[in-house]
Image (spheres, helix red, strand yellow):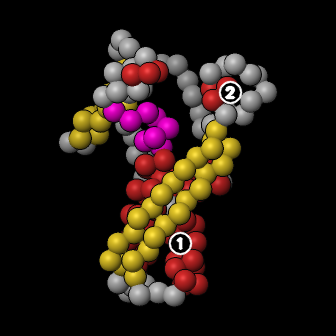
Amino acid sequence: MSALKTVQISANMQQGWKIESNIRDHHVVIDQPKYGGGTDLGPTPLEYFLFAMAGCIGTIGRIVAHQEKITLRGMEVDVSGEMDADGLMGRSPDAPIGFTSITISAKIDADLTEAEKTAFLTKVCHRCPLHANLTDRSVVEHRVV
């Protein structure tokens, strides 16, 4: 069995809606749009989540292409999520919280047939850790420290 790898970040929220983190050598900001009371200094957590999904699929796509000796010139990955905001806002106790569906669309620039591109994307999504976290339901714990 291989060793488990831990990926960890810390984020800090002070006043307002802005949340900041230093991840390796990168300063990252999450905020809310001005119409939502924020200062719009960064994407929302939901936008980052979808961006992370697209980025993960692109990264795994590059790995799979390299392993299978596919010349992958590029990928454009669009990710959208449908949700009912009443759940997260606490307006409706019966409303689901989070995305009820997520759609991933990829334009794959490689010399592959449509069927091969579909198979490639399926393999990539199967190996994407973020995709797996959603479909396999990771154990999530929370605690106050």
Residue 69 placed where, x, y %?
38, 86
Q: Is residue 128 above or below residue 67?
A: above
Residue that protrudes farthest toward the top in the picture: 15
Residue occupying the point 54% across, 50% down: 80
Q: CA distance from mark 1 to mark 2?
A: 32 Å
Residue 117, percent from left and from top: 52, 79
The residue at 44%/74% (across/down) is 108
Q: Is residue 41 above or below residue 105?
A: above
Query: Pointer 1: what residue?
Result: 121
Q: Position of residue 60 (x, y in %)?
A: 43, 66
Dot 1: element: helix
Q: Is residue 45 magenta?
A: yes
> Would you say residue 3 is visible in this rendering?
no
The tag on residue 87 is 2
Question: Is disc 2 surrounded by few (<14), some (14 to 19) or many (20+) residues within 10 Å?
Answer: some
Three-letter code, disc 1: Leu
Which residue is located at x 64 percent, y 38 percent?
Answer: 83
Bounds of the magenta segment: 42-49
